[in-house]
Amino acid sequence: MEVIELNVIDSKLMILVDDAGGLIPALNHSPWNGLTIADFVMPFFLFIVGVALAFTYKKPSCKVDASRKAVLRALKLLALGIFLQGGYVHRVSDLTFGVDLKQIRLMGILQRIAVAYLITALCEIWLKREDIVNSGSSLLRKYRYQWALALFLSVIYLCLLYGMYVPDWEYEVPTEPSSEPMKFSVKCGVRGDTGPACNVVGMIDRSLLGLQHLYRRPIYARMPECSINSPDYGPLPPDAPSWCQAPFDPEGLLSSVMAIVTCLVGLHYGHIILHFKNHRIRILHWMIPTSCLVVSGIALDLFGMHVNKVLYSFSYTCLTAGAAGILFAGIYLMVDVCGYSRMTSIFQWIGMHALMIYVLAACNIFPIFLQGFYWGNPHNNILKLIGVGS
């Protein structure tokens, strides 16, 4: 039940972030460092995916067959993500559709979930021992290879983020069809920079995916340096730095490494449900790592490793995974322990179909369907009547 409830919260938050983020700053993503309500949505989804995988692959009858099914599910989710967020489905204010394959966006929210799901599922299928669990230490021993992978991924991420050299780079901004594109040069030549222009996360995406396949409305374009309407998008200030209009993918390759770690943390919380039946013991085993994660995230931010959703920083991973643990334990306490489940029953369907609701609402499928019915002029449609996409 608590898995469904957390799915409901994530679905509603994702839809609110997409539809109301421009009106309510707290429901919009932080332009760079910092945290808003919107920045909790992705890690909460990844966390609950990990929890669910503990049940899905509790005792697979055939590991090879289970692995094959996991790969197929991930590929389906990846393909759906590229279709919905690659540029084929346009924004509500744009009545056209279709995308140039030379410029299709390769990464996105669903693609990141697919990657994290696949790696975590394979871990649960292959990287666990047959030990009997009767204590917290025996639980850690049983799944020690999964924790070793989480540690390895975190170390790799930190080494690359702070150790790789970022050279100077260039990009182009299209202008009029008959005019030459504007060229911009970004000066870097540094290591360990976590600012918008010279971080390793962006460099890896530019090198491996290509600038033309990255998200073209970078979130840092809402920073005061890049927008006179900050924290919203707006015209460039007169002294805007050269990197303000450069493509940058908030769901890039390196940042997705830490997304896998969030999913593995959720997997651990699911293991606690499987191996401990007492409510008090379950909550105790949840709150110990939860407290450590929250304290670590805050401490790292205070000491200079800033909480950053776009880079999926280590401090962001700790803080948001800990927050997900708090919410998960709270819902468990309310529904499973105290029995306050009468009102939550109406949300069960939403929680079980969270992906479908997200696709229809947050990916503009339902709004674009309504937009197709108009009178006289395509811009005179139902959405304009209610003030959406006008």
Image (tube, rainbow, N blue to C red):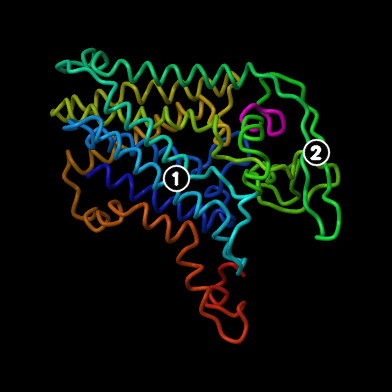
Q: Secondary structure at mark 1?
A: helix
SS class, disc 2: loop
Magenta stretch holds residue 198 = yes
On the image, which quarter does residue 294 sit in?
Answer: top left
50 is higher (above) or lower (below) than 314: below
207 left or right, relative to 40: right
Do the residues bearing badges 1 and 2 touch, measured as CB atoms within 8 Å? no
Query: Which label is found at residue 303?
Result: none
Whole-percent x, y for residue 140 in the image: 27, 16
Q: Residue furthest bottom?
A: 376
Q: Is residue 356 magenta?
A: no
Looking at this view, is 98 or 229 the one in front? 98
1 or 2: tag closer to the N-terminus: 1
- Badge 2 crowding class, 10 Å Cα cut-off, few under 14, some 14 to 19, many 20 or more, is some
Q: Provide the residue span drawn in magenta.
A: 195-202
The residue under label 2 is 241
- Quarter residue 247 falls in: top right
Q: Specify the quadrant that holds the N terminus.
A: top left
Q: Amino acid at mark 2?
A: Pro
Q: Which residue is mark 1?
A: 78
What secondary structure is the stretch in magenta mostly built from?
A: loop
Closer to us: 43 or 182: 182
Residue 37 is situated, as x and y percent measured from the top left of the image, at: 49, 44
